[in-house]
Image: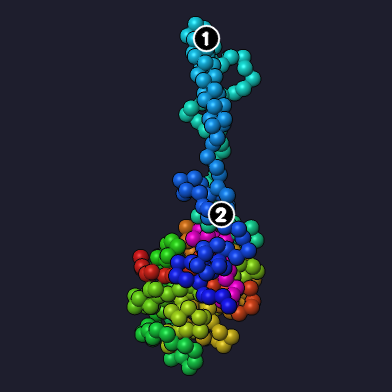
Amino acid sequence: MSQPPQPGEPEGQVPGSGTPQGQPYQQPYPQSYPQQQGWYGPPQPPPSNKTALWVGLGVLGLVVVVAVVAITGFVAPGFFLSDSKSDGAVASPSSSSAPTSSVPETAPSSSVRIPADRVPVPKRTTPLADPSECAYPASTGGEVPKKATPPASGPTPASGTTAVTIKTTVGDIRLTLDSALAPCTVANFLSLARQGYYDSTPCHRLATSGLQMLQCGDPAGTGTGGPGYTIPDEVFPEIKYGRGILAMAKTQAPNSGGSQFFMVFGDAELPPEYTVFGSISDAGLQVLDKVARGGVDESQGVGDGTGAPRIPVTFQSVAIG
């Protein structure tokens, strides 16, 4: 009956012997010589006297050769210089013969095709009354992750533009809001911005094929949240969507918008049912292009090819003016 290994003895050895079972015992060489096959394997042996003799003769021969070459070089200085007619090219010390390359911060996705041309901002053929009447009734459904105070109902300016800069974690996105297009929507967006509603809000949905847009404005980041009230639809038949357009998101029900909006950076074949209330600057579109080329995380989507952007986008603040 075998005994358990004693302290300090590895398993698989005969107890008390320090020898692996089934293997002949070998006295380890001193550790000053490198072990080539493990502690119990044969190490590289020290050089023999005959080997040392041959090494000594080799060193002596090398010394003689070096001396001859040195003397030759002293007598004929051109011996050490390369022939100017030689076929071998010598690289300049100030340049490198190895090519260099740079890697972009985010490798573009070859599957994303973004049109270069902007679409014109739509115009109403018949201007709205200025001022226009606006109302913001309380919402009856949906999530309210961050409640906001609605703008004052009543007469609202329906002319003029307002510049807005959204500071995000991937760069600034500058917008131009147009009250002549959608006075109630513009008033609502500016009110939410002044309340800090959009601060620390993620953009939760990116689409890069067919419909090319980034959707933002839900503090919960789920796409179901709103401010606790709704705004009216402000649409007209001439609305066209495309690169550079800023529009409100909504449910299938009419007048169901609130805080969520989408920024179009490419193609967008949509019916004129989503309120257009401004445009995106060229620099802002470049930020969106970068996010789009980063790709979509469809694991967080709903199976329609859209989902959270792989490059996370979070609003830090919204500045007016």
Q: Quadrant of residue 318?
A: bottom left
Q: Secondary structure at mark 1?
A: helix
Identify the residue at image location x=46%, y=45%.
Answer: 32
Judge by depth and name the residue closer to the eye, 99 or 104: 99
- Mark 1: give few (<14), some (14-19) or many (20+) Cα within 10 Å: some
Point out the stretch of residues depicted in magenta.
286-301
Q: Position of residue 193 (x, y in %)?
A: 37, 74
Confirm whether residue 163 shows in the render. no
> Is residue 300 magenta-colored?
yes
Residue displayed at 57% across by 57% down: 25
Q: Is residue 260 magenta?
A: no
Q: Is residue 125 above or below residue 292?
A: below
Q: Which residue is mark 2?
A: 26
**Mark 2: secondary structure:** loop
Of all residues, the one furthest to the left in this rendering is 195
Along the line of sight, the residue nearer the viewer: 198 or 136: 198
Q: Amino acid at mark 1?
A: Thr
Sequence-first disc among 2 and 1: 2
Where residue 137 sits, quadrant-wise, is bottom left
Residue at the image position 47 percent from the left and 71 percent from the top: 6
Q: How is the image coloured?
A: rainbow
Q: Which residue is mark 1?
A: 72
Callout 2, which amino acid? Gln
Q: Which mark is residue 44?
A: none
Q: Nearer the viewer, residue 242 or 112?
A: 112
Q: Position of residue 249 (x, y in %)?
A: 53, 78
